[in-house]
Image (cartoon, grey):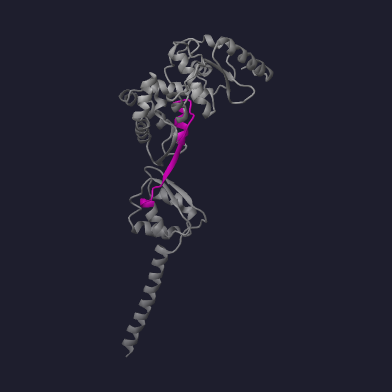
Amino acid sequence: MYIKKIIIAITIIGVIALGFFGYYVYNSIFSSNTSFEKKEVVYIPTGANFQTVVDSIRPLLKDLESFSLVAQKKGYASNVRPGRYVLEPGMNNNELVNRLRSGNSPVKVVFNNQERLEDLAGRISSQIEADSLELLNSFKDESFLEENGFEERTAIGMYVPNQYEFYWNTSAEEFRERMKKEYDRFWSQSRLEKAKEIGLTRKEVITMASIVQKETAKVDERPKVAGVYMNRYKNGWKLDADPTVIYAIKEKTGNFDTIIKRVLYKDLELDSPYNTYRYRQIPPGPIWMPDISSIDAVLNYEDHDFYYFVADVENFGYHKFAKNLAQHNRNKQEYIRWINKLGIKR
């Protein structure tokens, strides 16, 4: 009888212990273990180990020990995956581990209006894991450029400004390769046919578009501005584009942070292939990263008889167009009086 009571007592204690253990296991796996109220993003770098994950997620958890236990049991601790992970309030350890194991969330990468590859590298590095130096080296890789028909001067034209989805841990080379595919996709058969119709290569279209983009910020005016440059180009005239002179000055001095609001007559003599006041041909590469709207403005330029334009001081942002030099000089004098009145000397 006594032995029977002992057995019953041991059984009861075992059941209670098992219940407590089950409760602990259940809580460890299925109870909420987050301490935040809004979505949080965790970045796990390439090559990270579990300790890196622990250090990153520690401030977001109520109980780090239970998370670590579940991560060990599910095999995640020895199989950490880099990426960007969005964590939601109320997630339990099981959900957290599953998210970190297979929920790499893409990021929206946006870029436009970059002047040089260096600027583009800096812009992209702020949005994905690859740093600016890795990106710049991949952009300038001679083997890649030669294989794909680019030079360092024309390479920025391969990066079509838009919004793209990438995984945060995308490497510099993976980013570059994806952008080459996007470039090829952008140059559809219809765009290639239009380029052929107007007598320009893809690179020349992009370079011309970069000039148009720097001349006017007004999207609706770009086809008209493009029409002026195409009229000059088709008739064998120099383009006489002020933005190319500004770029030539920056390229010669190596100081791309210089702000130049006014082109002087002495600047027009600068010996540079980018100076379209001195050389008739289209510059050897883009002076800016043109928007898609500027590229399409060149491909679909407005057919008119204008050969000149100057800023319209009465309609800010737009320009006055002229068919002959006499008319242009009258418009130009009005602009010069206005810019002198503002005291802009450089």
> Residue at the spot x=38%, y=23% of the render?
195
Q: Position of residue 142 (x, y in %)?
A: 34, 23
Residue farthest along the right direction in this orientation: 341
157 and 65: which one is in front? 157
Q: Position of residue 173 (x, y in %)?
A: 35, 33
Compared to residue 107, the image places residue 72 above or below, namely: below
Residues rendered magenta in the picture: 100-124
Outermost bottom residue: 1
Query: Which of these two is toward me, 230 or 52?
Result: 230
Give the image quarter of residue 201: top left
Image quadrant occupied by the N terminus: bottom left
Judged left or right of residue 82, residue 341 is right
Task: From the viewer's side, name the closer residue of 331 and 260.
Answer: 331
On screen, residue 69 above or below 306: below
Depicted 235 relative to depicted 100: above or below: above
In the rendered picture of this protein, how many numbered marks are placed on residues? 0
> In the visual, does 143 lie left or right of 319?
left
Q: Is residue 172 left or right of residue 218?
A: left
Would you say residue 322 is visible in this rendering? yes
Residue 10 spot, x, y in % from top left? 35, 80
Q: Quadrant of residue 146?
A: top left
Residue 126 among those drawn in magenta: no
